[in-house]
Amino acid sequence: MKITSQMVKELRDKTNAGMMDCKKALTETEGDLEKAVDLLRQKGLAVAQKRADRATSEGIVECYIHAGGKLGVMVEVGCETDFVAKTDDFQAFARDIAMHVAASNPVAVSREEIPAEMIDREREIYKAQALDSGKPENIVDKIVSGKIDKYVSEICLMEQKFVKNPDLSVQDLLNELIAKMGENISIKRFARFQIGG
């Protein structure tokens, strides 16, 4: 199958991967766009896993102030070298993450950082709802477990759908950047300030 420049552009718009990587992925998947997206994500994930244990002691703090000055976010994004911290791609990623935090209001960067009492409180609410609706005791735990998993994915930054491209999670976006930069990159922390919030 002939891989057209339009197909490459479409895949590039979806994944932010390089032109040659997109063409290669489309060739390998015989022009199947969805399979090519998956292939590029797997490659990004593989590179990210290889680099995961490297220290990210360089980086930048990026700020985003929403129109009107009533909402602001600061985010710290780490990388291995000062060289990568100064690249346009890295800085654009940090800006995008700050804007995403402003829009999506996550509670924590990762699952492990979500306060246990928050999850316990939700678990109690879901359990009471399931029991009140007359569900049998033996399936209540499965229902509650599924709802907790969904709840956590909605409040955890790394698992949220990226506001500019809901096809990707923030983790997918990070994996793509790690693959592109060839360095470990991490979102270390964020702070979100809102007037009256």
Image (tube, rainbow, N blue to C red):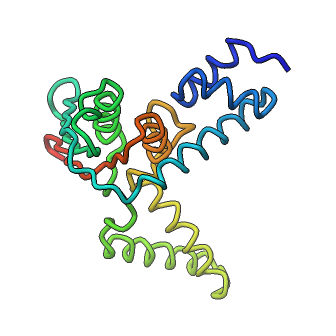
* Residue 122 placement: quadrant: bottom left
Identify which residue is drawn at 59% across, 42% down. 41
Nearest the viewer among 68 and 43 is 43
Nearest the viewer among 67 and 23 is 23
Furthest-bottom residue in view? 137
- Residue 100 is situated, as x and y percent measured from the top left of the image, at 35, 38
* Relative side of 9 to 2, left or right: left
* Relative side of 101 to 134, left or right: left
* Residue 163 placement: quadrant: top left
Q: Is residue 172 above or below residue 29?
A: below
Report the quarter where the N terminus lies. Answer: top right
Furthest-right residue in view? 1
Identify which residue is drawn at 66% across, 87% down. 138
* Relative side of 137 to 152, left or right: right
* Residue 124 placement: quadrant: bottom left
- Residue 92 is situated, as x and y percent measured from the top left of the image, at 32, 27
- Residue 105 is situated, as x and y percent measured from the top left of the image, at 32, 47
Q: How many marks?
A: 0
- Residue 71 is situated, as x and y percent measured from the top left of the image, at 19, 36
Furthest-top residue in view? 5
Nearest the viewer among 167 and 25 is 25
Identify which residue is drawn at 35% across, 33% down. 93
Identify which residue is drawn at 59% across, 44% down. 43
Q: Is residue 68 above or below residue 6?
A: below
* Relative side of 9 to 76, left or right: right
